[in-house]
Image (cartoon, rainbow, N blue to C red):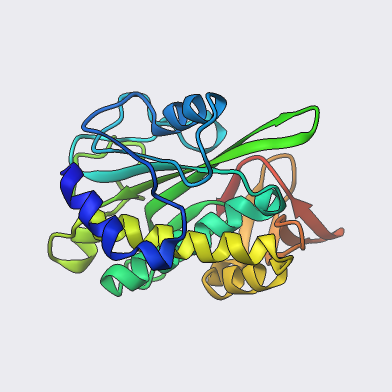
Amino acid sequence: MRAQFEDALTRTRTRRGRLGEPLHFYHEIGSTNDEAVRLAEAGAAHGTTVVASAQTAGRGRLGRTWFSPPDAGLYASVVVRERRAAPLLTLAGGVAVAEGIRAAVALPAEIKWPNDIVIDSGLGKRRKLAGILTEASSGANGLQFAVVGIGINLSAAAYPPEIADRATSISVELGRAVEAPLILVECLAALSERIAQLALGEGGAVLRRWLELSPSAIGTRVECEGSAGGITAGISNDGALLVRTQAGIEAIRSGQVRWL
C-alpha cells in the first residue's frame, strides 16, 4: 500500500507543493494527529504527512472518538508551518477535502460547519463522509505549527449505533470501490492551493468557496449549545457560524450545533 501512495504522490508533485513529503505510512496507529504532532515537535518540515489504514485512538471535534476500522477509511494528518494560514485553516481544510473528493471521484461533497464533509443522500438528509480536526501549537513567538487531520470514510463499515444513521462512505455513495491514494493526493493538492491563498492574504477567496460548498450555512434551522438557536446566515470573516436569532445575529465559534 505504501508504494501505491508514493506512486500517486510522484504523479501529483507539481500540484501539491510540499504537502505529502515526507510520507510516514502505517497500517495501524493510535492517532495520525498525535504522530504528526510528535514529528512536528521534533522539527518535521511543512508538508510532512502521516497516513494510516487504521487508527486505534482516532478522535474528532469536541473530543469525540473517530471510528477508524482497518481498510475502511483514509486517515491522514499534515504538518503546516504557514502562520498566515492558521486563522482559517480548519475552513480551508474543509474546502480542500470537499474539492479533493469531487476531483477524485466526481461525488458532490458538501461542507457542514465547521469541519464535516457530507453528501446529500436524498430527501434532504445529509450523511457524513469525512471530518477535519485541526490542532495547533504556539510558543513565545506565536504559532509554531498546526496539524490538519483528515478522516474519510472510503468503504462500508459496521458503524457504531450512535452514528450509523448519519454516516456513509464514498464507495457506498458511488456504488464502487475507490482508491485511497487517489483521494489523498487530490485532497493534498487542493489543500496546498488553499494554504497558498491564505499565505497571500486571500482569505476572502477561501471563505467564498467554503460558502459555495456549504448550502446548509444559509437558511437552515439549528439549535446551538447555550443558545436558543435560529436560522443560519453564513459565516463571519474569522470563520464563525452566523445564526439569526430573535435577538439578532449571533456568531457561533465553538460548542455543539444541532442541525434540524
Name the residue located 53 percent from the left edge and 38 percent from the top edge.
61
From what the image shows, is residue 170 above or below residue 51? below
Q: Nearer the viewer, residue 45 or 111?
A: 45
> Where the C terminus falls, by quadrant?
bottom right
Please say whether residue 125 is visible from this viewpoint: no
Name the residue located 66 percent from the left edge and 62 percent from the top edge.
198
Is 218 positioned to the left or the right of 122 in the image?
Answer: right
Please say whether residue 41 is visible from this viewpoint: yes
Q: Nearer the viewer, residue 13 or 94?
A: 13
Name the residue located 26 percent from the left edge and 39 percent from the top edge.
159
Residue 186, image x and y in percent? 36, 63
Occupied quadrant, residue 183:
bottom left
Residue 39, image x and y in percent? 47, 28
From what the image shows, is residue 16 above or below residue 43? below
Q: Nearer the viewer, residue 242 or 50?
A: 50
Residue 17, image x and y in percent? 46, 60
Occupied quadrant, residue 57:
top left
Name the residue located 49 percent from the left edge and 59 percent from the top edge.
191
Is 255 positioned to the left or the right of 180 in the image?
Answer: right
Is 183 positioned to the left or the right of 210 in the image?
Answer: left
From what the image shows, is residue 245 above or below residue 58? below
Q: How many marks?
A: 0
Residue 26, image x and y in percent? 26, 32
Query: Of all residues shown, which one is farthest toward the left?
Result: 176
> Where the N terminus falls, by quadrant?
top left
Query: Of all residues shown, which one is farthest toward the right?
Result: 247
Q: Nearer the viewer, residue 179 or 11?
A: 11
